[in-house]
Image (cartoon, rainbow, N blue to C red):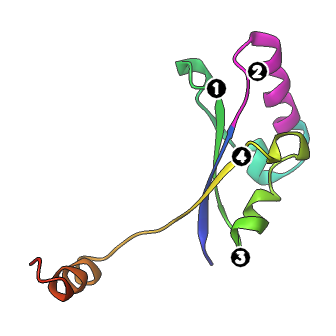
Amino acid sequence: MPRFLIEVPHDSDTVTCARAVHVFLTTGSHFLSNADWGCRDGDHRAIIIAEAESHEEARMIVPVAFRSAAKVVRVGKFTIDQIERTLKQHNAL
């Protein structure tokens, strides 16, 4: 199943930040309650890696209030064979 990086920004003031974290922690969703946060380093966003069938399904993990601001990126790994094939096809290896 495809994997997605979901980044959900929020405002940096203390109360807004705490409210965002509270919403995630109280949803009951495994994905949201286990989100990583960049807030302690001044990067006010939740970070989630989740499996989903599509970008749209991954976005639906995010609470409605934050959904429109969420960035959803399909992520994956490459093998050396895949990359070498691509490079050979482009005469770059």
Q: Is residue 88 above or below residue 61?
A: below
| Mark-to-mark CA distance, 2 and 1 | 7 Å
In the image, 89: left or right of 31? left
The structure residue drawn at horizontal position 74% and vertical position 42%, both measured from the top left corner, is 69
Residue 70, numbered label: 4
Q: Is residue 16 above or below residue 28?
A: above
- Give SS at disc 1: loop
Query: Viewer-nearest of labels 4 and 2?
Result: 4
**Identity, as a three-letter code, of the amino acid under mark 1:** His
Residue 44, numbered label: 1
**Identity, as a three-letter code, of the amino acid under mark 2:** Cys
> Would you call the spot at circle 4 few (<14 residues within 10 Å), some (14-19), or many (20 or more)?
some
**Identity, as a three-letter code, of the amino acid under mark 3:** Glu
Q: Name, please, the residue furthest toward the top.
A: 14
Label 2 near label 4: C-beta < 8 Å? no
Label 1 near label 2: C-beta < 8 Å? yes
Which quadrant holds the C terminus?
Answer: bottom left
Can you tell which quarter of the image residue 51 is in?
Answer: bottom right
Q: Earlier in the sequence, mark 1 or mark 4?
A: 1
